[in-house]
Image (cartoon, coloured by chain):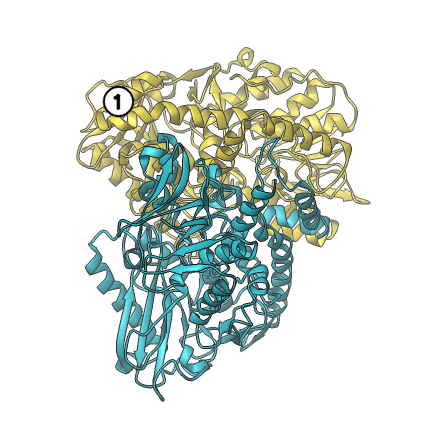
Chain colours: A cyan, B yellow
Amino acid sequence: MPSFDAIVIGGGTNGLACATRLAQAGQRVLVIEGRDKLGGSTAETDPWPGYRSPCLSHLLTHLDPRVETQMKLADHGLSFVDRNIPSTALALDGNHLVLTGAAGDTISGLISDADRTAWQGLRKRLMGFAGALAPFRAMTPPRLAKESGNQYLKLAQLGLGLRRLGRDEFREFLRLALINIADVLEDDLADDRLRGLVAFDTVLGAWMGPRSPNSLFLYLNRLSGEISGKRGATALPRSGMGSVATAMIQSAKTAGVELKSGAMVERIIVENDRATGVALASGEEISATTVISAINPKTTFLDLVGPRHIDTGFANRTRNIRSRGGAAKLHLALKGTPDFRGANLRSRLVIAPSIRSVEDAFNAVKYGEVPTRPVMEIILPSAFEAGHAPDGHHVLSAIVQFAPHEPKDGKESARNAMLENTLSVLEDHAPGIRALIEHSDFLMPYDIEDRYGMAGGNWHHGELAVEQMLFLRPFPAVAQYSTPIAGLWLAGAGNHPGGGVSGAPGWNAAERILSRGRS
Amino acid sequence: MNYDAIIIGAGHNGLVTACYLARAGLKVVVVEKNDWVGGAAVSRSLHPGFTYSNCSYVSSLFRPEIMRDLELPKYGLQVLPYEGGAVMTRDGGYLAIFRDHEANRREFSRHSPRDAEAYDPYSRDVFRHCRFIRPLLMRTPPDPARFRPRDLAELAWLGKKTFDLSESQIYEMIRFWTMSISDFLDEYFENPVVKAYLAVSAIIGTALGPMSPGSAYVLLHHYMGDVDGNVGAWGYARGGMGSITAALSASLTDSGGEIRVGKGVEKVLVQNGQAVGVALDDGEEIRAKRVISNMDVKRTFLKHVDEAELPASFVKQVRNFKIRGSSGKLNIALDAAPKFTALPEGSPMYKGDLHFTDSIERMERAYDDWKAGHFSRDPFQDVMIPTMIDPTMAPPGKHFMSCFVQYAPPKIEGQDWTDADRDAFGQTCINQIDDYAPGFKDLVLHAEIRTPRELEAEVGLTEGNIFQGELTFDQLLFNRPVPGYAQYRSPIKDLWICGSSTHPGGGVMGAPGRNAAAEILRDIRVPTDMSDAYAVL
């Protein structure tokens, strides 16, 4: 039975990042992935002949700078079509609004001067807050205890960073930290398209509407991401999202990580409260000094470790990780070019005409129902570069919100209704698009759960919400990546700073594991 | 005539401030636009023989320290604790509510044995949060953006108090403060009726639904009161809620304070950046060393102070203050006691809160209507019949019923309420009661229907918000009413605010009024015999 310093369960971006960091520090590391393909939800598929399509994530907003540089992703083939693709807020009358630059530093389209100025002010303020919060992403969450081994110096610096924004800005930060985004947008802006776009971006991937208190914090979280040093960027990798996964796999290999895909971990072997290895579905057992789970924390504790090795309170706490998925994923193969009333297809197309439209779409899923007018973010990778679809054809990828994860009327009927409503909204904005559809693939949150092992279909492996962030993510006892079981660590999106293709949780976990070894 | 202080508005907080100042030897006058005192804590006779608590309707939050300092029992205030209540379900059943923990637990077990088990840890956890927050009520919030000794000392006190908790308790508290009541209850309970009952306190008076993050805190806001030292208990003020303000008025007059009713304030007079008095509607001017407004912050600064006297940034902050009303009220004179099909006759449940909303989903859907700018089609109602305990409010054999209703928006789809809207709203509520008590409609002798429009017109609560400002974190503690002005002061020297727009917020609590008085007396270095905050727990 082969033995490793560390086994990483899950070959998604966080698993790869964690493994690479450990291997770079000289450890013998094995990554085990249950699916045939590494890369998790970042990988790509070839669903239909001639077409390539992203799996789940189709854009990059957070790529941890340490991961990007220390994994030398550029050397391993990662480059970008555009590091800051524009966002188009689609309007039914063709009066679209286009935001370009980091988090929309310029707006084009018909919009009042008052709104233009107000947006600049709001954006600057929020970018300032996000900048002050960004360093938190790259550290183990502090503990709120007197003797805790926190990085006090760093925390003090971060605290000071917020205070340095100035007294008035600091006060504004304290006021806005837990406010809802809708109120802020309504206070400052009058334009429905702009409000709708920001409201949509705020709750993208979340299980809450723009009127939910604490939602503004999610927008700050979005803005705190960076790509190649650019904050607030939305980047499209060259040759698709799959190239992020490919570059990471290459980097891991170069660092000496062993990769094993198509192998299901059946359980984590625990002896005397210590994790000593994993048992695969094939019956094979592999031992290691450290076992690191970069998959869902619920699956990790409830299925792989099992109730026998954890106490009841801990098991309950694990069950209480809120993990409702609210996003569906649509892929279309189109035999022509769709026309979104003149919108530039080389941009991120957002259908969320108002705050109300986003809130209404959320209302339905609270009761396990399908919204009549879903809101969505659309990307046509084939409009940016060749190679995604046959000539003259296109592939469309859309994140559609909100979709119920536990539909009242059954999964089949909810999927059909959701797809129909989605296509009908699309048709309204791009007349004739339905006639262009050659193939379609539609994933509801429960399909995503089945396919990618994300509990509840939540992309973040646990809802991103203030009460499940930082030292509360996924819950306090395991928020510093360590677990009550010696030798078992968490390194997935379920931990701080959460999901999105960033590699940050994996990298943070590796740093923590290494510093533990040193001390 | 020159006063030491003019208080604008004879609501309970204005009167509390006035009482404390008068007791400290200041010459005070309270001016009130209505012909009666009380603000939203009033008893009014609107139908012969009946007394309505026509705004606030139950008491629990009123701080016992204030009651003792101002000797309110001596001036006639009597709070009658009540027992009982029920959630009636659509299928004709009910969940009975008792004040006794064990009795409640037994009743829960009838619906779900698991929930009965969970009730102990639930109560323990909630009251731990409650214990933490209660001492904060009677303290002026620190300004975390300044480094004055008093702010640093107060922050240090808060820090120490926090770190007196265990590490896991701190985490649980932060979670509790930020999560939705629905998610919180899901961690303990399974039965929808039990959850619906427990969620109620989290939405009362609030423009949030049970699934809104932050709603769990609002629950605490309603739990931290007590009646006779029983924390979390509620009672009726004998003779209606006006008895509280009547006792305050008597206490004030006894201390030499003056109250002038029927005197609406037109403007706060400001000279050289300093408040010097008020100009009344009728042209009269009253001068004083300081002016204290019990009106909400929007009304005070946007309607009764010249904008030119205020910094533009402050005016913007006040404009952005959130004060959307979310509730309405029906006050009904009944010919006889109603009979609810689900409840056994003569049951003690009639003595408490009666609810028909038997699931969180129904409650949340009622909120969805509010968000869309409608009153709820299937509203949540907190129905009470105070005359089951206090016979002074109706003729023998007849009853006064108070129905608190969620949700009613400040405007209907962006338009002002019309009389037809109001009547439709009232009809919706009455129909709902009739569904559970057939024949109820025939008992109605008179009904007063109050939407946010009526609340604003009569009581002066902007947008009909009963808390003088929403209770979300962006408007609590040092953020209330607006950052930088949480210490009862305003940008204008000698103009103070003492209403529920300030910390710790709404409810018939008296704490804002008391804290404002403490700040004023501290400012002019007058020694007081004010009780310090103490925790009953």
Quadrant for residue B488, please give it: top right
Q: Is residue B155 left or right of residue A21?
A: right
Q: Is residue B298 visible?
A: yes
B450 or B157: nearer the viewer: B157
What percent of the width, then of the height, locates residue B192? 27, 36
Q: Is residue B365 left or right of residue B241?
A: left
Most extreme residue toward the front is: A1
Q: Is residue B37 left or right of residue B276?
A: left
A257 or A61: nearer the viewer: A257
For disc 1, the marked residue is B107
Q: Is residue A436 above or below residue B197?
A: below
What amino acid is labelled 1 in the image? Glu
Most extreme residue toward the bottom is: A391
What percent of the width, then of the height, locates residue A277? 38, 44
The residue at the point 36 percent across, 73 percent down is: A53
Determine the secondary structure under disc 1: helix
B527 or B232: nearer the viewer: B232
Q: Is residue A363 above or below residue A384?
A: above
The residue at the point 63 percent across, 54 percent down is: A129
The quadrant of the image that shows the N terminus of chain B is: top right
B176 or A442: nearer the viewer: A442
The residue at the point 25 percent across, 40 percent down is: B431
Q: Is residue B86 left or right of residue A67?
A: left
Q: Is residue B14 visible?
A: no
Neighbours of disc 1 within 10 Å: few (<14), some (14-19), many (20+): some
Chain letter of disc 1? B
What percent of the width, then of the height, locates residue A118? 61, 64
